[in-house]
Amino acid sequence: MATALAKSADAGSGTSVEYAARIEHVSKSFAGPAGQQLVLDDITLDVRPGEFVTLLGASGCGKSTLLNLVAGLDEPSAGGISTDGRPALMFQEHALFPWLTAGKNIELALRLRGLPKAERRGRAEELLELVRLKGAYGKRVHELSGGMRQRVALARALAQDSRLLLMDEPFAALDAITRDVLHDELTRIWRETNLSVLFVTHNVREAVRLAERVVLLSSRPGRIAREWTVGIPQPRRIEDTEVAELSVEITEQLRGEIRRHGQH
Amino acid sequence: MASTETSLVKEDGGAPAGKDGGGDLAGLEAGLDALETTAQTRRTPFRRTFMEKVFPPVVAVALVLVVWQVLVWAEVTDSYKLPAPSAVWDEVQEAWLQGTLLEYIWTSVSRGLLGFLMALVIGTPLGLLVARVKFVRAAIGPILSGLQSLPSVAWVPPAVLWLGLNDSMMYAVILLGAVPSIANGLVSGVDQVPPLFLRAGRTLGATGLRGTWHIVVPAALPGYLAGLKQGWAFSWRSLMAAEIIASSPDLGIGLGQLLENGRTANSMPMVFLAILLILIVGIAIDLLIFSPLERWVLRSRGLLVKS
């Protein structure tokens, strides 16, 4: 309830907020075989407008759970989350609807946010052009490659016109070259659109390549272990030495977090 | 394919590699897209379709006719029990010349299709309700799947008592046979909708009725179509059962009555003719309506792979 109230208050006041997402003392537990299991423990995190934050953690750290909470797909057990409008969400799987063409997938998002019919086609074409898929409007999902599908999914997420884009390991299933290209694309689009991004990944280099701020979560329960501000100027490349150096440092810390679990 | 690859390699080699220029990225991306997109499959030529789809069943039918004729020649049983193919063919010709052949077929087909359409109109909202409303599912879900296994012949006696010997009774039997299978098809279609689509729909703002209309219904379409196909089979069967049992002069002669008339007249050719027509109509409706519909839906989603 607290979440819902906070959200409606934001929408109602219409004043500009100083955050794209505010996560305050959020905990989440699920009913497991051994009673209640705490997955997220007292997470407090702000994403500023226009900021690119990556949430990094080993499997089981609850990073996807946190993203679902921010997306409003689930309710926190304690604490509150407020966002500046309804966030867009991109999944690891493209989640495009196979009964619609690429263009119509985007138009459905436009329609659901209430854009008049006459403007939808043009806006969908613009978004496809933004992800460099100009000719893909009439293509069926199965006719597109993995990388193209994720770009259409990105265009569909952008069609929601949210100020916050949540991404749940969206490039994890792609091959290395395609992923690299999509990193470049995402960085370009983020800089062009002044969007805030909360990006979940278990890939340290990817986190450093993309983010202004990397937040490391510990596992079981997920807590914020440490944060890094990444000062390396964009555009970066995944093979840059600065990226590599910071990645080594973060990986050390991540390994430490994982090692602690073996000692119980 | 080989030529496409070499030309792309040349293009990539020509551009300065490793730099972060926008043009370079666009080129790299275009190359990846071209490499990873599979070529469109072309339509199979008519000759091949004919050899793969039409020829085999024709052979099978011819074989059955040959075996039939051989059995008749061998006089394995009395001729009134097993008429010659030619005797059945004479029956067909006679019915055709009298103009009654199409009348038999039309009487039954029009009843069957109208009944099926009514079942569609009732079964679809019912299926949606059972699939989406927990209470309704708990209340009538098991009854609905139970009804599906009840032979619809069982409904003929009560339908005759309730409604009398008329067309309404036929439609009642069809509805009781087809509505459960259409509703159940939709329910299982909805149950098989990947949860990812529902979550994606919710983040796009498709909740409640909008979610049902934009996400659940189209996602459940393949299962729904399978249900419709089965629903038609059930409609046709129920109708035949009703026509055989409940024949009356004012009902007109459908295929079921033709079969029953053949039995009372002790005319095996007429019985064979009726069975043949019932079979042909069932296959024809499936081939002309449901199979193309199903193939179209599956193909547009990339679920039908051409071998």
Image (spheres, helix red, strand yellow):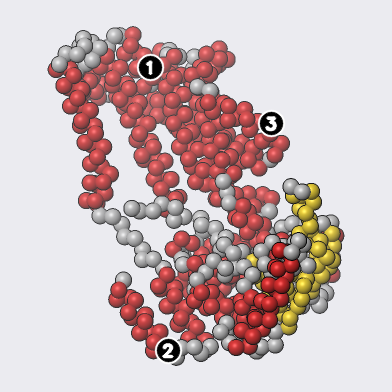
User: Could you say whether the residue bearing mark 3 is in a helix, strand or loop?
Assistant: helix
Nearer to us: label 1 or label 2: 2
The residue that mark 3 highlights is: B139
- Numbered-mark total: 3
Amino acid type at circle 1 is Gln
Quarter of image, res A110? bottom right
Return the residue nearer the eye: B27 or B220: B27
User: Could you say whether the residue bearing mark 1 is in a helix, strand or loop?
Assistant: helix
Nearer to us: label 3 or label 1: 3
- Residue at screen point 76% across, 76% down: A226
Residue B239 position within the rendered picture, expressed as x and y whole percent measured from the top left: 45, 23
Tell me whether the residue at label 3 lies in contact with that at label 1, contact meaning CB atoms closer than 8 angstroms. Answer: no
Return the residue nearer the eye: A46 or B212: A46
Residue at mark 3 to residue at mark 1: CA–CA distance: 38 Å
- Residue at screen point 53% across, 88% down: B20
The residue that mark 1 highlights is: B257
Nearer to us: label 3 or label 2: 2
* In this view, B137 is above or below A177: above
Of callouts 3 and 1, which one flags the residue occurring earlier in the amino acid sequence? 3
- Residue at screen point 27% across, 14% down: B268
Q: Chain under label 1?
A: B
Residue A71 position within the rendered picture, expressed as x and y whole percent measured from the top left: 72, 63
Residue A185 visible from this viewpoint: no
The residue that mark 2 highlights is: B15
Q: Are marks 1 and 2 on the same chain?
A: yes
